Image (cartoon, grey):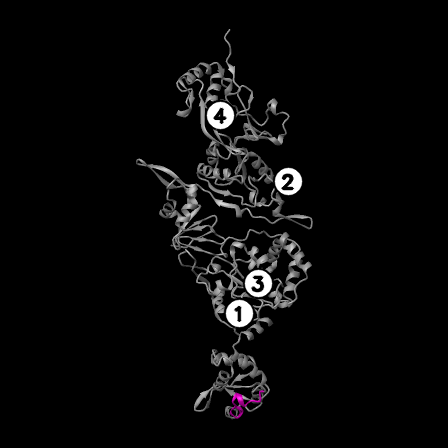
Amino acid sequence: MENKPTKIQTLNDVPSIAAYLARINARPRSIRSAVVEEVHGRYWKDLHVIRFHPGDKKHPVNAPEELAPTDAELEAILKDIDIYQWPASKLLGKVYELPTQLKKVDPENLFEFRNREGQLVMLQQRTEETDRGKYRPWTPFDDYLWRMCEPDGQLPIWGMEHLGEHTTVFIHEGAKAARAMHRLVNPTNRAGRDQLARHPWGLDLVNAAHLGWIGGALNPDRTNWVELAKCGVKQAFIVADNDAPGLTAVPTIARYLQGVTVFLVRFNQLFPPSFDMADEWPEQFFIEKDGERIYQGPTFNDHLRPATWATDLVKVGKKNVAKLRDEFKKSWGWVSEVDLYVCLQRPTLRFPDKVFEGHVAAFSHHNSKVAELVKRDLVCHFGRMAYRPDRTEFIIGHFGEAATINLFTPSGITPLPGDATPWIEFLTYLIPDKEERREMMRWVATLIARPDIRMSYAVLMVSETQGVGKNTLGEKILAPLVGMHNCSFPDEQQVVDSQFNSWLVNKRFAFIAEIYSGRSWKATNKLKSHITDRTVHVNEKYIKPHDIDNWIHVMACSNSLRALKLDATDRRWFVPTLTETPWPREKWIAFNEWIEGNGLRIILHWAKQFGDYVKTGEHAPMTERKGVMQRESESDAMQLLRSWCEANEDIPITVVERAMRDFLERSSSERRIYESSTELRRIMASLGWETFNERLRIDGLKQWVIMSPQVSKELASLPQDIVVHRKFVRATIKLPVDSKQAML
């Protein structure tokens, strides 16, 4: 009776193969393959794979030349190979029986790998062993036995049965993180829904399939990525572990994902080494407030990096020539106006040629010259960059012109309905006057909730007392709500003296913590155009000069009433009267805790519900503090003029404009007058001094004369006869030094 071939459980069951593998220091991986590895810390990398082909008499072993079996080894393998039965791996359905070795294993330590149709390909067992890592493969075979080995061919991806209609996937390093995230975004009960709501990045992780690759971070090419690329996936986020091997795998994975736009989720140094999405988040990112655990750590977008593979090599004659992939063309563009390369998904990433080449080097073939390829391809061409908070579209089309890239992206903070009382209390404390506080609320709410509105005036917050809360409002509240990437924090020197103006380019909010220009018009004049002009000429280091839309809103602070020189006609600055009495320490502690909790989200909701927003073109409201500053801004001559007018307002006196200018020049400390005659008459008019309605001939010249309030009052009681009026006014004309002003 003929003996049946012996079923093998592992390649080491075949004596000749076991001896051969021992000689070359290889270990069995599947029923038909073995591997020679190199250890790198807790990772290992495949150096060589040896494959066995039972039934192939000519080439039973496929191995690198330096590891090929000797003639004697090959003869022995050929002799032994027919003695054994070589089973093939088998797909199982939804219901199956575990191997005996796994029946008592905690289900949380078992991971099912299924294909897209839901058929089981293999199991992975998580163990506490450390000699070969924590995971063991188990594969079902057509002889109805399970073997602790991998299936033949490339490794399956965990979670393929969950892909469904999803076109966006998260690719995690390992099945553990992938399964944890799949469960998170697909809750089945109230507790699960609450967990998703509390997760720091929960909203960013939903509406996608979560997949896991296995085989070690140093061996990403062992995975069947081609199957994933064929499933209609359009966007992939690779979430590698927070270590060097995990990052090393990303370009290889991206190269296999043909037709897919790829991003890397790269954890920063605040996360522990080897962190993955299944791990507990660092406690330093959370605070406790009223029994609620509130996240204060980095956002999902903070960790995104473009990782789309750039090139394919095509044969042209005898050479391999690089060409751009279509998905890369959708990720990067070249802007001709400024000669920069812009990431279309993250427009804050903008690079000149050499920097761009360095940025994409890891995601392209060697010496591909990607920058040159992008410039050659009209699909990647854009005419200019724009900063348009009033437009929701990312690419702005212009008829007959190259498209424009909109660089504006909003803040990542989301609104939350809640009690805004602490916010209202803070504003009530900071700005005691009800009407001025209401105007400040309008400006702040518009800045936060209406990025489509460009307000025509800025805010100047002045308090002679330090520590009243100016910085809290600007830096801790408004800046994060506008989006830190939309803000700048220039000092006075950058605003006034620097030739570069990057502080206002592609920004919505500029916070100047301290400004003091005394009686100089330099800062005022510099800021004047920035506040109202619709465009700004960009002058940044290493960037080609160009014009861009101006959406800056300025908030400046000072402890001096001479912070800026403001003339009496100013309409660009709103100067609320601030408190001079700081809050008690316990109030500050409570308010800051509220802000660090959900305060910012509640303020955002308040702003979106506010309604009474500032309208485009609206001028700054007048305030008492602004009036004081305008007077403080006046020159010595104008302050002298104001004092003289106030001292003589009850005296029936008329002064000739030229005589008044001569008097002011002689009497002021500067010995000259910078203001025009029109400005002089305007200031006198603001104090009740009226200019006679025609010029009178005096000293052979026709000149304007200005009447005191008392003269105007007496003139109004006279008959409406111009001759009578002329005679009366002439009789009251005196030189300023002839008045009864006490100081003279």
Badges 3 and 1: C-beta atoms under 8 Å apart?
Answer: no
Instruction: Please state which amino acid type lies under the numbered disc 4.
Output: Asp
Q: CA distance from mark 3 to mark 1?
A: 20 Å
Residue occupied by mark 3: 443
* Disc 3 element: helix
**Sequence-wise first label, 4 or 3:** 4
Q: Residues within 10 Å of mark 4 (few under 14, many from 20)?
A: some
- Compared with 333, 152 (above or below) is above
Inspect this view and state whether residue 718 appears: yes
Residue occupied by mark 1: 564
**Sequence-wise first label, 4 or 1:** 4
Residue 222 within the segment the image draws in magenta: no
Disc 1 versus disc 2: nearer the observer: 1
Disc 3 versus disc 1: nearer the observer: 1
Instruction: Please state which amino acid type lies under the numbered disc 1.
Output: Leu
Q: Residues within 10 Å of mark 1 (few under 14, many from 20)?
A: many
Residue occupied by mark 4: 152
Q: CA distance from mark 1 to mark 2?
A: 56 Å
Residue occupied by mark 2: 192
Instruction: Please state which amino acid type lies under the numbered disc 3.
Output: Trp
> Which stretch did the figure color magenta?
728-741
Q: Quadrant of residue 573?
A: bottom right
Q: CA distance from mark 3 to mark 2?
A: 41 Å
